[in-house]
């Protein structure tokens, strides 16, 4: 078929992309499978190589396939990590932080890379969540978690400097027992959190930090932790790639006993 004749068929690339997507969704093409070569697809659908290329671009933009240099186009593999925000308040060994505990629970291999620990003036969103006065600085820890060799999530925490200045919370490396335990030792145990989830597409710097293929959405989880006095102590912002996570929440009905003030 000539290119001119092919161009007279509006929507050919869309139809090919839809057909391949249906094969992926049904399992006919499974995770890790290679798509047929371009010449095979041109013969199968009776179109030009350019139309096939446009169909593949659409599948990449949808985040369901990815190219491997010199090898071909493959169905993206789906091996998510089950992320449970409620695990922050569960009992765990005293020398194990939240991320390590999560990996052990899921039976996965991983590590945390501390990107930056420093002091700054927060943006307005963090300032308001921490109820800080204008010009009050925060300490921050910016981390990227790696699982199975891939950057899996970012985890950036902000705490008023007056609380953690000079403490182990400011350690550039990993704190084995976890920074939440450090906050507890400083008199600000986190006992309640308000979580906000914003599904969206990533910004260019976020795509680079997480090595995200085109078309991969993220969930931005903003968690504000409060101590026993109801004071907002820590804002943690996590970026969770949509192809690598399932966020699971547990809900419990409050009883009258739960509502009674602690004596």
Image (cartoon, rainbow, N blue to C red):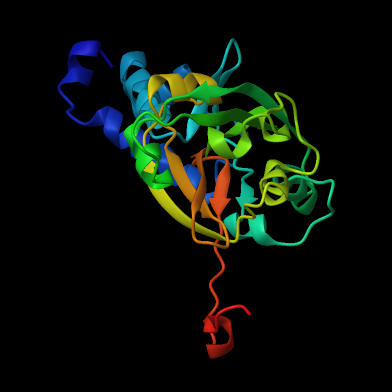
Query: How many numbered badges does the structure rendering display?
Result: 0
Towards the viewer: 249 or 137: 137
Towards the viewer: 213 or 208: 208
Image position, residue 115 (x, y; %): 62, 21
Image position, residue 73 (x, y; %): 53, 23
Q: Residue at x 73, y 43 (%)?
A: 178
Q: Residue furthest bottom?
A: 256
Q: Residue at x 25, y 12 (%)?
A: 2
Q: Is residue 136 above or below residue 232?
A: above
Q: Is residue 106 above or below residue 168?
A: below
Image position, residue 62 (x, y; %): 39, 34
Quarter of the rendering occupied by the N terminus: top left
Towards the viewer: 194 or 81: 194
Q: Is residue 195 above or below residue 253?
A: above
Q: Quadrant of residue 257?
A: bottom right
**Is residue 13 something one can see in this rendering?**
yes
Towards the viewer: 162 or 198: 162
Left or right position of 42 against 116: left
């Amino acid at each position: 078929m000539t290119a001119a004749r092919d161009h007279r068929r509006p929507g050919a690339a869309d139809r090919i992309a839809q057909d391949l997507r249906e094969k992926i969704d049904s399992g006919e093409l499974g995770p890790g499978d290679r798509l047929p070569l371009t010449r095979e697809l041109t013969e199968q659908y009776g179109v030009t190589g350019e139309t096939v290329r446009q169909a593949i671009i659409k599948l990449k933009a949808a985040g369901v396939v990815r190219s491997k240099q010199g090898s071909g186009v493959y169905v993206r593999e789906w091996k998510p990590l089950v992320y449970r925000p409620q695990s922050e308040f569960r009992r765990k060994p005293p020398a194990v932080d939240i991320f390590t505990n999560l990996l052990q629970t899921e039976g996965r291999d991983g590590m945390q890379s501390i990107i930056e620990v420093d002091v700054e003036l927060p943006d307005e969103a963090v300032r308001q969540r921490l109820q800080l006065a204008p010009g009050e600085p925060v300490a921050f820890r910016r981390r990227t978690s790696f699982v199975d060799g891939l950057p899996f999530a970012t985890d950036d925490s902000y705490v008023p400097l007056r609380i953690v200045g000079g403490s182990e919370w400011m350690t550039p490396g990993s704190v084995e027992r976890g920074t939440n335990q450090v906050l507890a030792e400083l008199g600000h145990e986190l006992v309640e959190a308000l979580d906000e989830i914003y599904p969206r597409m990533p910004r260019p710097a976020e795509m680079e930090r997480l090595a995200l293929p085109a078309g991969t959405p993220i969930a931005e989880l903003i968690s504000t932790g409060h101590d026993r006095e109801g004071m907002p102590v820590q804002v943690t912002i996590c970026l969770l790639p949509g192809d690598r996570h399932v966020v699971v929440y547990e809900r419990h009905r409050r009883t009258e006993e739960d509502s009674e003030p602690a004596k």
